[in-house]
Amino acid sequence: MEYTENYYGLCHGTDEKSAEIIISNGFALNGDEASWCGKGAYFYDIKAKAWWAARRKCAEIKQNKFCRIKPVILLADIENIPKKDTFDLRVKKDLESFESFVDGMFGENEQIEIAGIDNEVERKIRLRSVLISFYAEKNNCKLVIGHFRQRPQPLYEHAIKFADSLDMIFGIETIYCVKDTSIVSNIRLGGSKQ
């Protein structure tokens, strides 16, 4: 029998209009190599962090379009996903497999340059997300899970206000990046705020 995993009530922060589209049509894969794990649909297991993401997105929309928009939380489930379809960076075996994959591509001590990016932190973030996406695609992974340290940027400094766990206080967050939206089910409204 194949080992499967379930993740219930994963939280996605967005704006009211996008939430309506997602509820009607399902999630789309968004993001690029600057996103945590590359292109995907992103979720948190901490509702407060999803609220923070929703407010941040709405603030960006207001700044660019000068319109009033409400933040919204969507909840969704991932049920009976085979373990082989999950790339879990919190699991030693998966992390070792990823490290071996990267070492096989570049060598242990090789410095990798990314054109147009001089900032060391940004270069590492881009490289990490590109390699995670490439590894997930090569191994047919539908879900990537990992603990990530919050980025040291002004946009992220106020995230601690929404902390409701020690992980958040220490700046670590668990991110669920769906690479195949067919695994997402039971999409529902988790709340909206004025």
Image (cartoon, grey):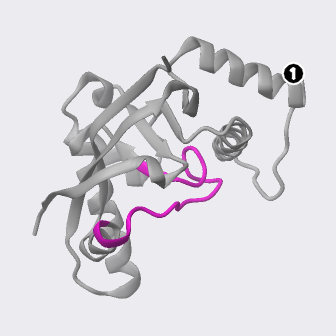
Tell me the quarter of the picture where residue 113 sits: top right
Quadrant of the snapshot with the C terminus: bottom left
**Which residue: 88% across, 30% down?**
106
Considering only vertical position in the picture, is 19 above or below 150? below
Tag 1's secondary structure?
A: loop
**Residue that lies at the very extreme toward the front in this rendered image:** 1
Considering only vertical position in the picture, is 161 above or below 20? above
Task: Residue 34: give x, y in percent of width and height.
Answer: 61, 53
Considering only vertical position in the picture, is 188 above or below 15? above
* Residue 166 relative to residue 60: left or right: left
**Residue that lies at the very extreme toward the bottom in this rendered image:** 66
**Which residue: 86% across, 32% down?**
111
Q: Residues within 10 Å of mark 1 (few under 14, many from 20)?
A: few
Task: Residue 173: give x, y in percent of width and height.
Answer: 38, 33
Q: Which residues are magenta?
A: 23-42
**Which residue: 61% across, 13% down?**
93
Tell me the quarter of the picture where residue 96 sits: top right
Confirm whether residue 110 shows in the render: no
27 or 125: nearer the viewer: 27
* Residue 20 relative to residue 35: left or right: left
3 or 179: nearer the viewer: 3
121 or 133: nearer the viewer: 133
Confirm whether residue 140 shows in the render: yes
**Residue that lies at the very extreme toward the left in this rendered image:** 194
**Which residue: 89% across, 23% down?**
107
Give the residue number, with chain letter if any, for mark 1: 109
Q: Is residue 125 magenta?
A: no
| Majority secondary structure of magenta residues | loop
Given the image, on which type of amino acid does mark 1 rest? Answer: Asn
Task: Residue 67: give x, y in percent of width and height.
Answer: 27, 86
